[in-house]
Image: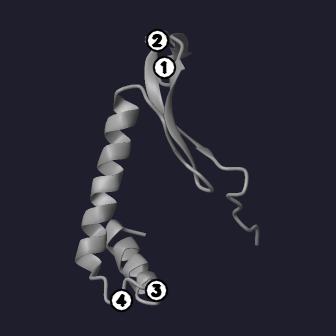
Amino acid sequence: MTKKELAAKVAAACNGTEAHGTPAAVVEEVITATLGVIKDVVYCGGEVTLRGFGTFGHKNRKAKTARNISTGEPVHVPARKVVSFKPAADFNVAQD
């Protein structure tokens, strides 16, 4: 699902509430701003928790030695920070 499709679904869902007629373009701006704030907070080392959804944060990966699959020679992989997402306990995805 793209951001535009998400905005259209959220706008359609809002039309049944007190926010009648929320345009998809406005919803898309709100989604873009929200994702931008989450990205900025995580980039600065913080974390964002959305109750019932999950927590965005970062983890530190240690340096390690890997192997080049073509030549088999060892390659040093430096330590780095990676973005992480931990889903909330009640965030269930139904299994088919």
Quadrant showing the N terminus = bottom left
Mark found first going from the N terminus, 3 or 1: 3
Q: Which residue is mark 4?
A: 20
Do tag 4 and tag 3 residues touch (Cβ < 8 Å)? yes
Taking depth in this image into account, of 73 and 59 the one nearest to the observer is: 59
Left or right, 15 with respect to 69, comes to left
Taking depth in this image into account, of 54 and 64 the one nearest to the observer is: 54
Other-residue count near label 1 (Cα within 10 Å), few / some / many at <14 / 14–19 / ≥20: few
Q: Closer to the observer: label 2 or label 4?
A: 4
Image quarter of residue 27:
bottom left
The residue furthest right is 96
Q: Amino acid at mark 1?
A: Asn
> Helix or strand or loop: what does disc 3 sit on?
loop
Q: Closer to the observer: label 3 or label 1?
A: 3
Disc number for residue 68: 1
Other-residue count near label 3 (Cα within 10 Å), few / some / many at <14 / 14–19 / ≥20: few
Q: Position of residue 42 (x, y in %)?
A: 40, 34
Do tag 2 and tag 4 residues touch (Cβ < 8 Å)? no
Quadrant showing the C terminus = bottom right
> Helix or strand or loop: what does disc 4 sit on?
loop
Query: Where 34 falls versus 81 (above or below)?
Result: below
Other-residue count near label 4 (Cα within 10 Å), few / some / many at <14 / 14–19 / ≥20: few
